[in-house]
Amino acid sequence: MTRGSKIIAMGHYQPARVLTNDEIAQMVDTNDEWIRDRVGIVTRRIADTESVADMAAAAAGKALANSGLSAAEIDLVTVATCSSVDRCPNVATRVAAKLGIASPAAYDLNTACSGYEYAGAAVVTGVADDEEPGIGPVMWGSAPDKSDVITIEGWRPYIQQSGQTVFRWATFALPALAERACAAAGITPRDLAAFVPHQANLRIIEPLARKLGVVDAVVAKDIVESGNTSAASVPLALSKLVERREIPSGAPVLLFGFGGGLTYAGQVVRCP
């Protein structure tokens, strides 16, 4: 009988093609300075031939290798996404097939950009009876009255967003919610070694970190080089920090996602 769970390994994948702000400026009326000033993005990655399942399998395969486990030891595959082109089969079963995982429970989860925190993905295992959990309680919820401020509707995959509404909600409502996630884990924001929020906009990340009082912690800012990667942004940023050993193993890290819905979820995890 186990008392909780913990993350034992992370993995990430990004396509090779890099798209700069100057290239964006050749497509629409904008420029590098305007983009950097308003959202903080310098570059982003573009998938040319890779599908969501291809990229998810590459990231999961890396996490599996880092964990030291075999495919036969995995009994659940969860994929958080809102960008899969295909409606059926789900992405999770395709990832399982690519990795040779024989008979897992497999499902996709769509809470837009907060999907990772709802799913608690990565390679996760139970803890022993005498071991403290490595994943704290999930503090989650949504603001359904604002569910139409970010939409991807119908068969035309275009995002429509009321940017100012999202920005105001994120900067004013989220600090208290993030504090609740810390309190649920029995710590304060000042105890954190790192803060990894959804990489939506650098102008949201920086004031959110200041209001939360985590100025001495590592604050993930992968948005600068990766852009907004939706549900992938938190695990992508966390995996890079772990790989670069910027967070000590076992140190408390606050993960916090938010996105369309408007959904949000956060939890404190111990760095693998």
Image (tube, grey):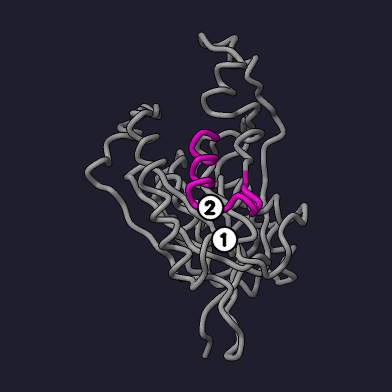
The label shown at residue 213 is 2
Type of amino acid at the residue the image marks with label 2: Gly
Left or right of 88? Residue 245 is right
> Residue at the spot x=48%, y=38% of the render?
204
Q: In the image, which residues are magenta?
A: 202-220
| Count of all numbered marks drawn on residues in the image | 2
Type of amino acid at the residue the image marks with label 1: Arg
For the residues labelled 1 and 2, say whether their Cβ atoms are less than 8 Å apart: yes
- Among numbered discs 1 and 2, the one appearing first in the sequence: 1
- Most extreme residue toward the right is 244
> Residue at the spot x=39%, y=29% of the render?
159
- Which one is in front, 128 or 13? 128
**Does 131 appear above or below 81?**
below
- Which one is in front, 219 or 191? 191
Left or right of 260? Residue 38 is right
Query: Residue 34, position in %: x, y?
Result: 55, 16
From the image, tell me which residue sits under label 1.
Answer: 190
* Residue 141 is inside the magenta segment: no
> Residue at the spot x=43%, y=43% of the render?
82
> Residue at the spot x=57%, y=40% of the render?
51
